[in-house]
Image: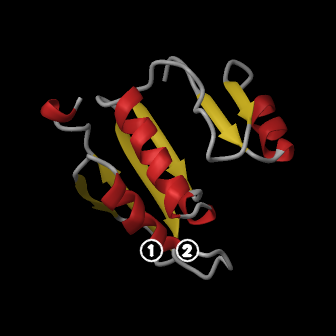
Amino acid sequence: CEAYTGLDAVETPLAAARLALPRGRFVRDVLPCHLPDGTYDLILLSEILYFLDIDALTHLAEQIDARWPEADVVAVTWLGPSGNGLEGEAALMAFGRATLRARRGAAPADPRHRIDIFDPAPEGSR
């Protein structure tokens, strides 16, 4: 890719990512937050949805839909116990209900994860 922006709440993985991808942009923040400005054609939500509650998932989906309607969204979800209010599959379903995007389907993954692809928002909803 030409550009990469990563967001995480913890500095340790951000520091490792900066070493691995020195040309990347890395932001430390906690969702729900204002997502980093930029032009994105792919948004990867990797093992993050189950850390959020319904309101935060709704805010995240609405922000992505409004700011990057033409981007593909890929959600990687851990299916094991997380100890959070919403477990992986429930959080994924809540995000799916909150977004305007259609879920294209799930890509093959190991039995502990799900990888779902959401198409760009429909033309009339932009």
For the residues labelled 2 and 1, the Cα–Cα distance comes to 6 Å
Quadrant of res 56: bottom right
In this rendering, the count of numbered labels is: 2
Is 39 located above or below residue 68 in the figure? Answer: above
Of residue 14 and residue 98, the one placed in the foreground of this image is 98
Residue 112 place in picture, x, y as percent:
52, 76
The colour scheme of the drawn protein is secondary structure
The disc at residue 66 is none
Residue 19 place in picture, x, y as percent:
80, 30
Residue at left offset 58%, top offset 59%: 47
Residue 10 place in picture, x, y as percent:
81, 47
Is 107 located above or below residue 89 in the figure? Answer: above
Residue 120 place in picture, x, y as percent:
26, 37
Judge from the rendering whether residue 31 lies leftward or rightward of residue 46; answer left or right.
Answer: right
Mark 2 lies on residue: 86
Q: Pick out the residue farthest to the front.
A: 55
Judge from the rendering whether residue 96 lies leftward or rightward of residue 2; answer left or right.
Answer: left
Of residue 83 and residue 14, the one placed in the foreground of this image is 83
Is 7 located above or below residue 5 in the figure? Answer: below
The local secondary structure at tag 1 comes to helix
Mark 1 lies on residue: 90
Residue at left offset 57%, top offset 64%: 53
Label 2 crowd (10 A; few <14 / some 14-19 / many >=20): some
- Disc 1 residue type (three-letter): Ala
Marks 2 & 1, CB-CB < 8 Å contact = yes
- Disc 2 residue type (three-letter): Leu
